Each structure stands twice: as C-alpha cells, then as structure tokens.
Image (cartoon, grey):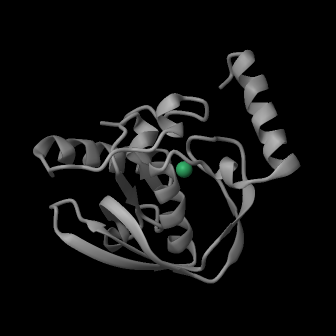
C-alpha cells in the first residue's frame, strides 16, 4: 500500500526515531509499503519517519527500481565509517520542489539489520553514500534543509511557510 509522505513541518519528521526492538510481521508490512511508496514517488530512499512511523528503518534503491539487487532495507542502521567529501544537489520527497547543494562524505559504511533481522554491513560510495547519510539524518529528525546555512536555508524555509499559509504545502 502506498502511504502518504509527510512534508517539512510535520512533527514526526523533525524528531529522532526509536530503535526497533523486534522484527515482526507487522514490520514487514511497513517495509513493503515503504518500498512501494518510494518507487511510486519516485525516489531513491525513504525513511519510516517520512510515512509518520517514528522507527529506525529506511529503504533505498539508487537504481530507482531498475535493478532488484540495489534494493536495500536497513533496520536500526548506524554509520560506522565515513570519508571524503562530495558537493551535489540533493532533494527530498518530504521537501518537494526544493533542491540544494549539500556536502556529504563520498564513502559511508552502514551497519544494521536487514529485513529478516540479520546483521548486515554495506559500504556506499558516491550516490549511495549520499543516500545513506540522507536517510540516517531522517532517523535523527534532520532534513537536508537543516544541513544548509544562512540565506539558502532562510529562503527555503520562508517559501515553505508561504506555501503552507496558502494551503499549497
Ligand atoms: Ni529525504
């Protein structure tokens, strides 16, 4: 089932998510919904907080569904290594219509559980490294907008507030 994606300003997005205690069948329903929602959007990553569930889970597929092998599910992920720096435009399904250059490491190693509760460690480089860190930020209640400084951040937040006031957000 495709679930509605929360937008910047909705509380669950701005709060840290809780660790998952146990991998249950209900969790598989949530994960399958998240995958379906990500592909439908379309996007290359989606965190549980974006569908209003404050649990530490994200899904990612930098091929956007072109290659099954690229689909990744992480439960209770944590960043174990990060290196380098890349400067690319980044967007977010929860901040539609806005993009900004965000500095991210070029390499990121993430450890956590897969959808069956087995431990997995995945190394991401370039786009996948960016995606991992973007999704990990979501689980800490942080959006890419929060990574911006000064005028760029002010402008985006001001535009979103204006859209909200006119009921277009
Ligand atoms: Ni996002």
- Occupied quadrant, residue 156: top right
Question: Picture coordinates of residue 109 (x, y %)?
Answer: 43, 78
In the picture, measured across the screen, residue 150 lies left or right of residue 136, that is: right
Image point (46%, 61%), residue name = 64
- Occupied quadrant, residue 76: bottom left
Image point (21%, 71%), residue name = 119
- Image mark count: 0
Question: Picture coordinates of residue 123 (x, y %)?
Answer: 41, 80
User: Would residue 44 be visible to someone looking at this image?
Assistant: no
Image point (52%, 73%), residue name = 129
Image point (73%, 16%), residue name = 165
User: Is residue 63 depicted above or below 91 in this figure?
Assistant: below
Farthest residue, direction right: 151
User: Would residue 78 be visible to someone looking at this image?
Assistant: yes
In the picture, measured across the screen, residue 73 lies left or right of residue 144, that is: left
In the picture, measured across the screen, residue 34 lies left or right of residue 64, that is: left
Question: Picture coordinates of residue 14 (x, y %)?
Answer: 54, 38
53 or 37: nearer the viewer: 53
Farthest residue, direction left: 25
105 or 163: nearer the viewer: 105
User: Is residue 127 depicted above or below 134 in this figure?
Assistant: below
Image quarter of the N terminus:
top left
Image quarter of the C terminus:
top right
User: Is residue 139 depicted above or below 156 in this figure?
Assistant: below
In the picture, measured across the screen, residue 68 lies left or right of residue 98, that is: left
């Amino acid at each position: 089932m495709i679930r509605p994606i929360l937008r910047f300003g909705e509380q669950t997005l701005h709060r840290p998510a809780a660790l998952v205690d146990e991998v249950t069948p209900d969790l598989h329903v949530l994960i399958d919904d998240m995958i379906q929602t990500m592909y439908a959007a379309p996007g290359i990553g989606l965190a549980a907080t974006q569908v209003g569930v404050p649990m530490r889970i994200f899904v990612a597929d930098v091929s956007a569904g072109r290659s099954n092998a690229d689909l990744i599910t992480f439960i209770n992920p944590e960043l174990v290594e990060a290196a380098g720096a890349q400067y690319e435009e980044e967007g977010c399904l929860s901040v539609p219509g806005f993009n900004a250059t965000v500095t991210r490491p070029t390499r990121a190693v993430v450890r956590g559980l897969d959808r069956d509760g087995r431990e997995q460690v995945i190394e991401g480089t370039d786009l996948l490294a960016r995606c991992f860190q973007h999704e990990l930020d979501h689980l800490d209640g942080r959006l890419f907008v929060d990574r911006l400084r000064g005028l760029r951040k002010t402008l985006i937040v001001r535009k979103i507030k204006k859209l909200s006031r006119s009921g277009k957000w």
